[in-house]
């Protein structure tokens, strides 16, 4: 069950009941019908001209208003004179998915509400908000100037945008948001933008390039997983802002990608059973504005459709489900469009019904803050590497050989003195660390393996793979000494653990029973591998330090295994040795001891590389065993040296 919080304490059921009891229509005192709710910038005000905006209830605008028409809620919209076109693209993408629609617009029939109150769901900083609005809309000459349906009796998109404007602060404040923000707020998914590679028309092999194949895979996977996807053409000259291209496409407008389908052309009768003929990938798009469709190959009336029998078209799902939908070949798609905007909807915790029959994804969430003076160190740089570690740090454990991961850093909105939302530039880094690290990092020995983009916006998203091991995630502001709150969200195809690293080192007064000795040194060790082992197949190593132990993964089919095992140990007695043991794994029998290396545990305060011959263990340490082990080891007096 998805938990929903009343926005600013307004409870829809309570307000609706009060209005019905008093026989008065609902008027929202928190977002009143007036200029303070518009709060438009000069550019938007110019579009309105000298005309006075009049706020009218939907029953004053139309004699028979409806929330939505059951057959047309997904298409035929306009962003109006206010001009938040990105919002209607996000709304159109949402409306195409029944499960998303039912959650975003809850408990509403298609008829207008008799007491003039509506409520909608949006996601903000880890919470679903239930936002109530009245049915006053800004108009000029009885025409709605905010986003609206081309069907003059349908008002869902106008009221939905009004609710979004309310949580932003005003219609004018929406101008600081974009399609990525809207898709995230509507679905709670992970937004991501991907540039479509620039292709030369003269390149006859462009469709088989690795970049293009990657885009094709992304699109197919995004639609298969039930996520949302839009695409757009970038404007390179001001004159292109509203110009329709020769192919019928409109720059700036975000089209919704609704399907891809691979087909074989010129297949009739028995041929279609054997998939002969030319193979082609088609992409189906929707233009939320409801007009100006593609006029190239495979447009609605093009001759290319004659190469596919009507029965085969229906069987393959090559249909136009909406008036504003059209198909186009993939090669035309990537040559015409510049940008993909994707909203990954992965977790069953968002909308369980949306993921029925799809693989389960797991979610981990952490809330945190950059605080002055000790936890706002700024971004990683070769000059200030150690200062960068003065940021919050989070341990990330991957227990499977390889996982697919989506990581999102969301910063909490801050308000400027005039109420304008403000975001600082943020990003994050991921480091591979010792397998048993449980305390904060203090010195940088290796650079981050992953560095995100730094974005002056609400969300930073990274999508990729991680292999088995322990990692530390460090979210940062770009500049140091900036305070802000943030949220980290992880989605993975396997269970994943995320926890903040709080302590600098083990403190016996906080974490241990009485009379436990405080550590006096810290040892860092990497067991690189071994050579010249006795006849064996599958080997692993174990590091033993003062009663603690750390075991490597098994390396199969090698007499010269490379384990790369990294460990960190806080020492109470540096006179005791560090022992590394080599073993052969025997699943059906007892594991076989191959030899050990005994290393000095005394403080040397520098990393040294050693190769040690293997010997026996216990009272047989004078016996030599075949093989040699290679390690990197350092012991420091300063507990915050690593």
Image (cartoon, helix red, strand yellow):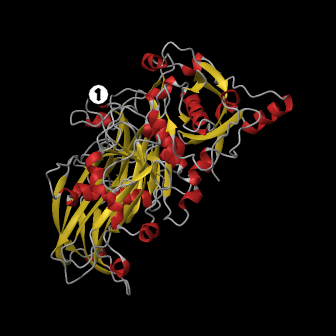
Viewer-closest of 521 and 403:
403
For the point 71% across and 42% down, the residue is 111
In the rendered view, would you say 492 is above or below 45?
below
At which x and y percent is residue 549? 37, 64
In the rendered view, would you say 89 is above or below 329?
above
Viewer-closest of 83 and 274:
274
At which x and y percent is residue 72? 57, 47
In the rendered image, which quarter is residue 245 located in?
top left
In the rendered view, would you say 110 is above or below 62?
below
Residue closest to the far top: 50
In the rendered view, would you say 268 is above or below 380?
below
For the point 17% across and 53% down, the residue is 608
Does the image show residue 550? no
Residue closest to the far bottom: 588
At which x and y percent is residue 431? 31, 49
The crowding category of the residue bearing disc 1, from other C-alpha atoms within 10 Å (few below 14, some 14 to 19, many at least 20), is few
Q: Which residue, given by chain and number where applicable, does mark 1 sit on?
A: 239
Mark 1 lies on a secondary structure that is helix
Q: How many callouts does the rendering have?
A: 1
At which x and y percent is residue 332? 28, 52
Q: Is residue 418 left or right of residue 615?
A: right
The C terminus appears in which quarter of the rendering? top left
Does the image show residue 116? yes
């Amino acid at each position: 069950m998805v938990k929903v919080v009343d926005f600013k304490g307004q409870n829809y059921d309570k307000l609706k009941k009060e209005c019905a009891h008093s026989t008065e229509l609902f008027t929202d005192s928190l977002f009143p019908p007036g200029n303070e709710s518009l709060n438009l910038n000069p550019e938007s005000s110019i579009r309105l001209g000298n005309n006075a905006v009049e706020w009218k209830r939907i029953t004053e605008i139309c004699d028979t208003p409806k929330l939505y028409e059951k057959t047309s809620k997904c298409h035929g919209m306009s962003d109006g004179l206010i001009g938040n076109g990105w919002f209607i693209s996000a709304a159109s993408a949402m409306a195409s998915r029944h499960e998303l629609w039912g959650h975003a617009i809850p408990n509403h029939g298609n008829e207008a509400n008799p007491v003039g109150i509506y409520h909608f769901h949006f996601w903000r900083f880890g919470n679903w908000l239930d936002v109530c609005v009245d049915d006053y809309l800004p108009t000029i000459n009885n025409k709605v100037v905010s986003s609206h349906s081309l069907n003059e009796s349908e008002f869902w998109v106008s009221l939905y945008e009004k609710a979004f404007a309310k949580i932003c602060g005003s219609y004018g404040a929406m101008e600081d948001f974009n399609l990525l923000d809207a898709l995230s707020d509507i679905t709670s998914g992970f937004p991501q933008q991907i540039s479509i590679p620039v292709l030369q028309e003269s390149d006859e092999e462009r469709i088989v390039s690795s970049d293009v194949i990657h885009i094709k895979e992304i699109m197919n996977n995004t639609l298969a997983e039930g996520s949302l996807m839009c695409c757009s053409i970038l404007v390179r000259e001001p004159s292109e802002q509203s110009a329709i291209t020769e192919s019928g496409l409109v720059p700036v407008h975000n089209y919704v990608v609704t399907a891809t389908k691979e087909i074989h052309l010129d297949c009739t009768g028995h041929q279609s059973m054997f998939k002969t003929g030319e193979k082609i990938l088609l992409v189906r798009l929707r233009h939320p504005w409801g007009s100006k469709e593609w006029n190239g190959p495979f447009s609605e009336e093009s001759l290319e459709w004659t190469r596919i029998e009507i029965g085969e078209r229906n069987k393959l799902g090559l249909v136009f489900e909406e008036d504003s939908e059209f198909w186009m070949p993939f090669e035309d798609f990537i040559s015409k469009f510049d940008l993909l905007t994707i909203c990954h909807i992965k977790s069953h915790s968002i909308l369980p019904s949306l993921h029925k029959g799809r693989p389960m994804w797991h979610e981990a969430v952490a809330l945190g803050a950059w605080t002055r003076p000790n936890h706002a160190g700024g971004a990683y740089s070769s000059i200030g590497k150690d200062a960068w570690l003065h940021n919050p740090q989070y341990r990330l454990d991957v227990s499977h050989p390889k996982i697919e991961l989506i990581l999102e850093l969301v910063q909490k909105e801050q308000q400027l003195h005039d109420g304008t939302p403000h975001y600082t530039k943020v990003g994050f880094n991921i480091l591979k660390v010792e397998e048993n690290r449980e305390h904060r990092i203090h010195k940088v020995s290796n650079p981050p393996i992953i560095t995100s983009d730094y974005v002056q916006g609400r969300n930073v998203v990274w999508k990729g793979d991680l292999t088995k091991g322990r990692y530390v995630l460090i979210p940062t502001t770009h500049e140091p000494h900036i305070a802000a709150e943030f949220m980290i969200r992880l989605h993975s195809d396997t269970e994943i653990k995320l926890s903040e690293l709080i302590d600098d080192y083990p403190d016996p007064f906080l974490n241990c029973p009485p009379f436990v000795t405080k550590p006096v040194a810290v040892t860092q060790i990497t067991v690189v591998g071994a050579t010249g082992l006795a006849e064996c197949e599958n080997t692993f190593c174990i590091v033993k330090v003062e009663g603690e132990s750390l075991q490597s993964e098994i390396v199969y089919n090698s007499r010269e295994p490379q384990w790369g095992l990294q460990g960190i140990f806080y020492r109470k007695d540096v006179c005791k040795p560090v022992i590394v043991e080599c073993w052969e794994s025997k699943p059906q029998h007892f594991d076989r001891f191959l030899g050990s290396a005994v290393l000095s545990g005394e403080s040397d305060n520098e990393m040294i590389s050693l190769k040690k011959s293997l010997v026996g263990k216990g009272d047989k340490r004078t016996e030599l065993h075949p093989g040699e082990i290679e390690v990197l080891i350092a012991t420091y007096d300063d507990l915050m040296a690593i």
